[in-house]
Image (cartoon, grey):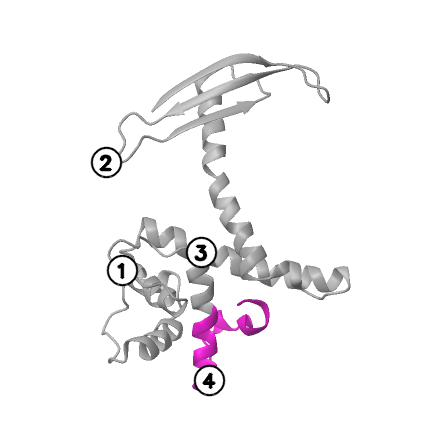
Amino acid sequence: MTLRQERITLPATKQYPELTVTALLAREEHPPENEPPIEWRLLTDEILATLRNAVLRIEWYRRRWMLEVFFRTLKTGCNVEESQLSTKEQLEKALVIYLIIAWRVLMLMTLGRDVPELPCEVIFDREEWQAAWIVSQKTPLPPNPPTLGNMILIVARFGGFLARKNDGNPGAEALWRGLYNASVTLQKLSMPLPKRMRLNWSSICG
């Protein structure tokens, strides 16, 4: 990666005076084959006196996408803005549940991409993956837990993910809908929900 910085002055406008900022350019020098290089152009009002300080700001920006996915899951997946709660206490209690769900969806998406070879029981309860396997695969349970990547695909298929060759990894929406639909399916079949699925998805997500 090539990293460059320069102090520049933005001209004044009718609403704001001129402002001196640090312009930061980060460019990927060796992208994957047939992929364009990543190039970020950032502005900050901080003076970055060392390379370490500049790299730290790049690291902060890298986390922006994860934060956006987290809050999108919280807002859209859990319909947090549509809750009809009327008191601060009710909202605070609901947010505890919503935040756990959004965190879990984000963790599934991240670990499924980074370490799909792990056994799925690092995330899923045994009863949870076994129930989903029985419903979706319609085959006897395997002697050992499936991999995390395989289990995430099973859950994502409950959410409409097609898992075609060029589809890539499941996103947040497929996972939250998959968890919701899996819990609904198990309830319709009168199967007891594993404890990690007892967050009442049917009332807070969909």
- List the single residue furthest toward the bottom: 190
Q: CA distance from mark 4 to mark 1?
A: 28 Å
Of the residues tagged 2 and 3, which is closer to the observer?
A: 2
Looking at the picture, which amino acid does disc 4 mark? Lys
Mark 4 to mark 2: distance in Å? 47 Å
CA separation in Å, label 3 and label 4: 24 Å
Among numbered discs 4 and 2, the one appearing first in the sequence: 2
Dot 2 or dot 1: first in sequence order is 2
Q: Say what amino acid the circle numbered 3 marks.
A: Ala
**Sequence order check, earlier mark of 4 and 1:** 1
For the point 33% across and 27% down, which residue is it?
28
Residue extending farthest right: 87
**Which of the labelled discs sits on residue 164, or is there none?**
1
Give residue 146's quadrant in the image: bottom left
User: SS at mark 4?
Assistant: helix
The magenta segment: 180-206
- The circle drawn on residue 34 is 2
Q: CA distance from mark 2 to mark 1?
A: 21 Å
The residue to which callout 3 is attached is 172
Tell me which amino acid carries mark 1. Answer: Arg
Residue 35, how many percent across, how many down? Answer: 27, 35
SS state under label 2: loop
Residue at image mark 4: 188
